[in-house]
Image (spheres, rainbow, N blue to C red):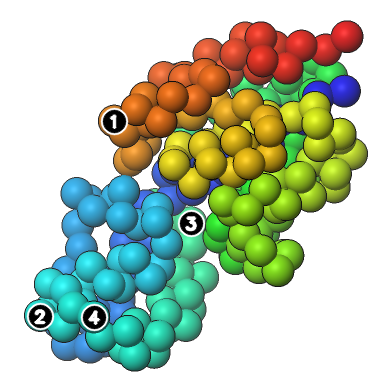
């Protein structure tokens, strides 16, 4: 049995629009208006604090970590209130996942999004049942790139942590898989796409149609 674990933001779905909207809601509350735009999508995928820091820098308040700490819980509230207004699963993702599942692979999610928000989003998108596990940033005492969340996602999906691969879009995903001694497949679409080739993963895909053969090559079933 092989297990395929997916990152969420920027890999399974483009969540950047709703993330940016949540950060801009914070900036509007502060009287600064919308400070982030679509060109900042890659920053959005680095998390709420990264977006807040960029906005604070544009306000001339770079380094104001106290304000970042104050705004972060508010950002999460704004995000939960409108978590699926712009988010879309990438084309072909669920078809590829169904094909792999029918071929004997197990599926799971390992994300640095808080687990509760990941549960809400996947359920709203109608895809939660496709995955046997979900590990978020706060499920364990460590998060990616520590390898343990990836290993635990494999275990909870019913798989063997030595027989798995990680599908991701970032340096964090590449390093998480490497630390676990597992191969990674990075996507070249999405906000982080132009930079993934330089990370030298075991495989790159430009569309989810390419995922099943990549997984079968890296993780053949007996």
Density class for disc 3 (Cα within 10 Å; few <14, some 14-19, many ≥20) is some
- Read off the residue under disc 2: 60
Q: Position of residue 75 (x, y in %)?
A: 41, 76
Q: Marks 2 and 3, Cα distance to the nearest angstrom? A: 31 Å
Q: Are marks 2 and 1 in contact (CB under 8 Å)?
A: no
Q: Marks 4 and 3, Cα distance to the nearest angstrom? A: 31 Å
Q: Is residue 27 left or right of residue 142?
A: left
Looking at the image, which residue is at 49% across and 25% down?
Answer: 201
Q: Marks 4 and 2, Cα distance to the nearest angstrom? A: 9 Å
Instruction: Name the mark on residue 145.
Output: none
- Read off the residue under disc 1: 194
N-terminal label among 4 and 3? 4
Density class for disc 2 (Cα within 10 Å; few <14, some 14-19, many ≥20) is few
Q: Quadrant of the N terminus?
A: top right
Residue 44 higher or lower than 14, as above or below: below
Q: Are marks 4 and 2 in contact (CB under 8 Å)?
A: no
N-terminal label among 4 and 1? 4
Where, by quadrant of the figure, is residue 64 drawn? bottom left
Q: Is residue 14 left or right of residue 165?
A: left
Closer mark to the observer between disc 4 and disc 1 = 4
Q: Quadrant of the C terminus?
A: top right
Looking at the image, which residue is at 29% across and 30% down?
Answer: 194
N-terminal label among 1 and 3? 3
N-terminal label among 2 and 1? 2
Residue 62 at least partly seen: yes
Density class for disc 1 (Cα within 10 Å; few <14, some 14-19, many ≥20) is few
Q: Marks 2 and 1, Cα distance to the nearest angstrom? A: 29 Å
- Read off the residue under disc 3: 84
Q: Position of residue 73 (x, y in %)?
A: 47, 83
Q: Are marks 4 and 3 in contact (CB under 8 Å)?
A: no
């Amino acid at each position: 049995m092989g297990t395929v674990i997916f990152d969420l933001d920027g890999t399974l779905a483009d969540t950047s629009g709703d993330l940016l909207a949540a950060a801009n809601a914070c900036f509007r509350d502060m009287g600064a208006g919308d400070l982030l735009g679509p060109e900042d999508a890659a920053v959005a995928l680095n998390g709420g604090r990264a977006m807040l820091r960029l906005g604070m820098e544009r306000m001339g308040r770079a380094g104001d970590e106290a304000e970042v700490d104050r705004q972060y819980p508010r950002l999460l509230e704004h995000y939960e209130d409108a978590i699926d207004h712009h988010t879309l699963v990438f084309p072909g993702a669920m078809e590829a996942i169904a094909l792999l599942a029918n071929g004997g692979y197990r599926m799971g999610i390992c994300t640095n999004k808080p687990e509760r928000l990941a549960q809400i989003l996947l359920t709203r998108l109608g895809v939660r049942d496709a995955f046997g596990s979900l590990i978020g940033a706060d499920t364990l005492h460590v998060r990616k790139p520590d390898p343990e969340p990836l290993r635990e996602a494999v275990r909870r999906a019913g798989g063997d942590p030595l027989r798995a691969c990680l599908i991701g879009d970032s340096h964090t995903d590449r390093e998480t898989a490497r630390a676990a001694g597992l191969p990674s497949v990075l996507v070249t679409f999405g906000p982080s796409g132009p930079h993934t080739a330089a990370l030298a993963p075991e495989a790159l895909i430009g569309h989810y149609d390419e995922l099943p053969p990549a997984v079968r090559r890296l993780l053949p079933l007996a």
